[in-house]
Image (cartoon, rainbow, N blue to C red):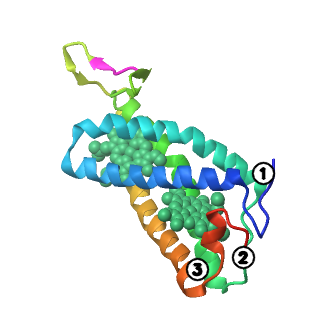
């Protein structure tokens, strides 16, 4: 498999970046929207996509470990390099821990998980009131809920900084950082 070079990224790096990146932006937006508007019909869709993307994230992290981090297209100030590194780490850790915390929050809360009709974890119903989910581990569900909420907020900030950074490279520095992630040789 062809690895990344400073001049050109491999197809796998580019495909995994955009597949994960755009799905995560969608999940963040739907997550906030459905929670704020209490749109219950979006929950199963959010949960199913969030669960499925986890396997692509694992492939992406494995590929990143094999490949190493991208070499910047040119030399930048120390502060810019540190900021980019911190943001990339928040994004990588977030993509791993958001699906895990979401999964634990739902399943430990007794709500179960269904992926487009396929039952992955069954609901834990209260025998006296079958319409009500019964928590399996209330404190783990509550802890995972907090992680999902706060890490979600941190990811939104990181994604904004990341996109602003990409646009700054493209429009102000006029270098090949964004074009390289779009498949160009720079
Ligand atoms: C429209 C949105 C986005 C744009 C324009 C964008 C752009 C870029 C660019 C140009 C790079 C290359 C940086 C370099 O060469 O050092 C990059 C790398 C990266 N991006 Fe994004 N990105 C977007 C969304 C996201 C999202 C939502 C995530 C995470 C959930 C993400 C995670 C990463 C990570 C971890 C890297 C480091 C390199 C790698 O692991 O492949 N990006 N992005
Ligand atoms: C990368 C994957 C994921 C991302 C980026 C994500 C993002 C979010 C965000 C930003 C929220 C709003 C949080 C708030 O404002 O309190 C949310 C809510 C939620 N997410 Fe996720 N999520 C992901 C995966 C999952 C998974 C796999 C599940 C379950 C299997 C899940 C279940 C939920 C539930 C049930 C809520 C609503 C919580 C509430 O009612 O307070 N999420 N998600």
- Mostly what secondary structure, the magenta segment? loop
Badge 2 vs badge 3, beta-carbon distance below 8 Å: yes
Estimate the spatial distance between the alpha carbons at disc 2 and disc 3, rounded to whole Å: 10 Å
Up-down relation of residue 48 to residue 66 (above or below): above
Residue under label 3 = 169
Spot occupied by residue 47 in the image (x, y as percentages of width and height): 39, 37
Spot occupied by residue 39 in the image (x, y as percentages of width and height): 21, 42
Which comes before the other along the chain, label 1 or label 2?
1
- Report crowding for label 2: few under 14, some 14 to 19, many 20 or more residues within 10 A (C-alpha): some
* Ligand 1 lies under 8 Å from the Cβ of mark 2: yes
* Ligand 1 lies under 8 Å from the Cβ of mark 3: yes
- Name which residue lies at 55% across and 47% down: 96
Q: Secondary structure at mark 3?
A: helix
Residue 66, disc: 1
Foreground disc of the pair 3, 1 = 3
Write down the quadrant of residue 176 in the picture: bottom right
Residue under label 2 = 73
Badge 3 vs badge 1, beta-carbon distance below 8 Å: no
Up-down relation of residue 5 to residue 94 (above or below): below
Could you tell whether 47 is left or right of 165 in the image? left
């Amino acid at each position: 498999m062809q690895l990344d070079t400073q001049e050109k990224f491999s197809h796998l790096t580019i495909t995994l970046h955009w597949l994960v990146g755009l799905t995560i932006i969608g999940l963040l937006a739907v997550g906030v929207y459905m929670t704020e508007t209490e749109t219950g019909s979006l929950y199963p869709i959010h949960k199913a996509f969030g669960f499925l993307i986890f396997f692509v994230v694992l492939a992406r992290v494995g590929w990143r470990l094999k490949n190493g981090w991208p070499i910047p297209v040119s030399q930048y100030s120390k502060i810019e390099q540190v900021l980019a590194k911190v943001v990339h780490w928040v994004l990588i850790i977030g993509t791993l821990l958001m699906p895990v915390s979401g999964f634990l929050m739902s399943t430990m809360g007794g709500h179960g998980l269904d992926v487009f009709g396929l039952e992955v974890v069954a609901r834990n119903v209260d025998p006296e009131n079958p319409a009500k989910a019964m928590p399996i581990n209330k404190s783990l569900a509550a802890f995972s809920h907090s992680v999902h909420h706060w890490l979600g907020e941190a990811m939104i900030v990181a994604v904004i900084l990341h996109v602003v950074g990409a646009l700054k490279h493209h429009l102000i520095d006029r270098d090949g950082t964004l074009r390289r992630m779009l498949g160009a040789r720079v």
